Image (cartoon, grey):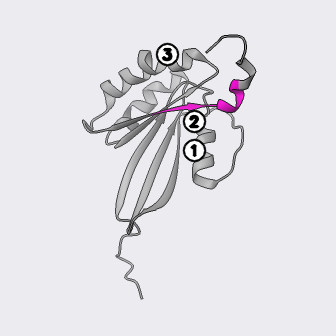
Amino acid sequence: MESSNQAEFDYLFKLLMIGDSGVGKSSLLLSFTSDSFEELSPTIGVDFKVKYINAGDKKLKLAIWDTAGQERFRTLTSSYYRGAQGVIMVYDVTRRETFTNLSDVWAKEIELYSTNQDCIKMLVGNKVDKLGLFIGIGTF
């Protein structure tokens, strides 16, 4: 019989998803945590999901914070940067301004609010399935 005091995981990682509104952060998170896909309404404030994965003989708990992209919620999300080991910066490949805002807005927020000097930053281009709509008009 297992002890109830035994940890259910070996390592906990706090991850934060950031990017403009409508880039698909919540849909990506839902797809990753529950293997399903839905178009979702905009996140208000912040959402939170947990995913357990195995890496070798270790069990990892990923605590993933999905932040709202609208500017009016940015003051709420500043506290979520604290202690994050990773930040996933998401942009919509069909909307160039969402990519530009990663450096103009979101990278500055990481610099301002992150308390972890070793925080890993990952760049994710989303909505590649929509890219075909723009082929031939020279957008990219």
Q: Residue at x 49, y 15 (%)?
A: 100
**Residue located farthest toward the top when viewing the structure as drawn:** 138
Q: Which residue is mark 1?
A: 29
Q: Is residue 16 magenta?
A: no
* Percent position of residue 50, x then y: 50, 54
Q: For residue 100, which numbered disc appears in the image?
A: 3
* Percent position of residue 126, x then y: 60, 32
Q: Residue at x 69, y 37 (%)?
A: 40
Q: For residue 25, which numbered disc appears in the image?
A: 2
Q: Distance from label 3 to label 1 (Cα)?
A: 22 Å
What kind of residue is marked 1? Leu
Residue 31 in the figure: left or right of residue 72:
right
Q: Are marks 2 and 1 in contact (CB under 8 Å)?
A: yes
- Which contiguous range is marked in magenta? 123-131
Identify the element where label 2 is drawn: helix
Name the one closer to the observer, 55 or 105: 55
Q: Are marks 3 and 1 in contact (CB under 8 Å)?
A: no
- Give the quadrant of residue 1: bottom left
Closer to the observer: label 3 or label 1?
Answer: 3
Identify the element where label 3 is drawn: helix
* Percent position of residue 33, x then y: 58, 52
- Give the quadrant of residue 26: top right
Closer to the observer: label 3 or label 2?
Answer: 3
What kind of residue is marked 2? Lys
Q: Does 74 sit above or below residue 66?
A: above
Q: Distance from label 2 to label 1 (Cα)?
A: 6 Å
Which of the two labelled residues, at mark 3 and mark 1, occupies the earlier sequence position?
1
